[in-house]
Amino acid sequence: GILSTDGTGKIDQLKNEILNTKKAIQNDLQQIALIPGALNEQGFAIFKEVYSLSKEIIEPAAQAGVAAYNKGKEINNSILEAEKKAAQEATEQGKTALEIESAKKAAREAIEKSKQGEIAAAAAAKTQEYDLMKVIDTEKIKKTFGVFAEVNKLTAEQRAYLDDLEKQNQKIYDLTTKLSIADLQKSMLLLTQNDLHTFANQVDVELDLLKRYKEDLNLIKNSITKLSTNVDTT
């Protein structure tokens, strides 16, 4: 039918690269989470803002394209079912081969007529190229990261993790532009299977890590204070 396609294989090739990028992002975030003092309230607020910049990252046009394409596939299947049923009924009624074909054609055309718009939309979706992700506002991210670095007096090494984070996010965006509909579906699947909404899905984990790290530090500080106080009194 009009909708059979396996994609170009682009996503299969990209899979490892996308997964490596994901790992790099996780590592960057964890390294940033370990920065002592990165967790003052101001730094925390900035970190949250960085995530919100990339929260809704799937391009709506891509979602609409996939929905139209899937609807077309559904209609295609219902046409095949209707043809099968019509052929079966005609055969049971002892119709000729020609009449059976004619019954199948009538069944098919009835659906094609009633679903004309959706079939056209599916065919159109198939001819287009899609970007999986919305364009990332790099300027805003740069600015936010800059403030984060200043607030937390980051060293050059710590700064490097922030820069890499930005680079990795851009890389995922670049890897998933101009996709055919089949590749688009594969890339969506890849992202959901591997829980890779770049920044977005990592936020809760990382902010939780930051919070716990902060609490641990406070516990340690308190213990040290207690210990030193005890030592003084003996």
Image (tube, helix red, strand yellow):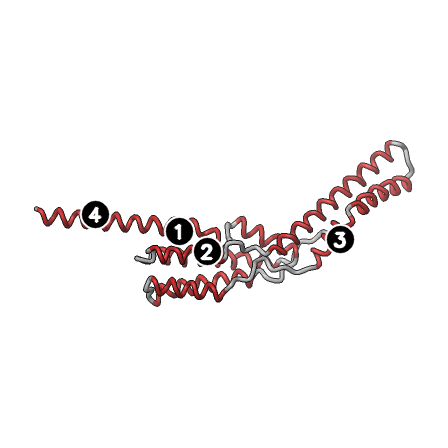
**Marker disc for residue 223:** 4
Counting from the top left corner in percent of width and height, residue 162 is at 41, 63
Q: Which badge, 3 or 4, comes first in the chain's sequence? A: 3
Q: Is mark 3 on a helix, strand or loop?
A: helix
C-alpha separation, residue under disc 3 versus residue under disc 4: 69 Å
Q: Which badge, 1 or 3, comes first in the chain's sequence? A: 3
Viewed as shown, does residue 92 lie left or right of 209? right
C-alpha separation, residue under disc 4 versus residue under disc 2: 34 Å
Labels 2 & 1 near each other (Cβ < 8 A): yes
Counting from the top left corner in percent of width and height, residue 213 is at 32, 51
Where does label 1 land, which residue?
A: 207
Identified by mark 4, the residue type is Ser
Q: Of 56 and 126, which appears nearest the observer?
A: 56
Q: What element carries label 1?
A: helix
Where does label 2 land, which residue?
A: 51
C-alpha separation, residue under disc 2 versus residue under disc 3: 38 Å
Q: Which badge, 2 or 3, comes first in the chain's sequence? A: 2
